[in-house]
Image (cartoon, grey):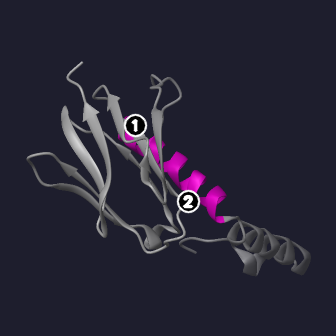
Amino acid sequence: MTGGWPLAHMHSGEQRSQRGAVRASISIGGMALKTIVILLSLLVVVNGQTPQPHAQKQRVEAEFIHIDSGGFHPRSITRTPRIFFLIVRNYNDIRNLTISLNQQGGGNVRHIPMQDHGGDWSEALSLPPGTYVLTEDNHPAWRCTVTISPH
């Protein structure tokens, strides 16, 4: 067998128990599942590999941005050039939002259809120093400036 659980070699009670565990893991709520995915991706992103027992730990911060009828809040963020989670939550009644993160004077860093992410989006980013603008495609007045200072 190359993967999965060896259900064929279990007694029927064990099979039901394993299948129940599968159902329970599938029914985890959306935010709990997103949190697990974020934490697992953080382990890979921070060290570039799976963590070793004696690996140096790195503290990773998060920036929370929410969207409501007035646009992005906060309107600006300033950070140093270290890895961080950018977390965008949609509290607006509009569900089909598409946000973009662009480097000022440069190209597109991310283009995110929020409906593809359950209305919320988060990602670990490591941006070089510069000014970035978070916008929503259909609401040009909605802007959040993300400044990554050199120090």
Image quadrant holding the C terminus, namely top left
Specify the amino acid type for callout 2: Tyr
* Percent of width and height locating residue 150: 20, 23
The residue that appears at 54% across and 46% down in the rendered structure is 39
* Percent of width and height locating residue 101: 27, 53
* Percent of width and height locating residue 9: 76, 76
On screen, residue 123 versus residue 68, left or right, reads: left
On screen, residue 85 versus residue 7, left or right, reads: left
The residue that appears at 85% across and 77% down in the rendered structure is 16
Q: Residue furthest right?
A: 13
Is residue 50 something one can see in this rendering?
A: no
Determine whether the residue tagged by mark 2 lies in a helix, strand or loop: loop
Q: Mark 2: give few (<14), some (14-19) or many (20+) Cα within 10 Å.
A: some
Query: Which mark sits nearer the N-terminus, 2 or 1?
Result: 1
The residue that appears at 53% across and 55% down in the rendered structure is 37
Image quadrant holding the N terminus, namely bottom right
35 w.r.t. 69: above or below: above
Magenta segment boundaries in residue numbering = 30-49
Q: Mark 1: give few (<14), some (14-19) or many (20+) Cα within 10 Å.
A: many
* Percent of width and height locating residue 137: 29, 67
- Reading the image, the residue beneath label 1 is 84
Q: Residue furthest left?
A: 105
The residue that appears at 45% across and 55% down in the rendered structure is 70
- Reading the image, the residue beneath label 2 is 91
Q: Which quadrant holds residue 93? A: bottom right
In magenta stretch: residue 65 = no
Specify the amino acid type for callout 1: Phe
In magenta stretch: residue 48 = yes
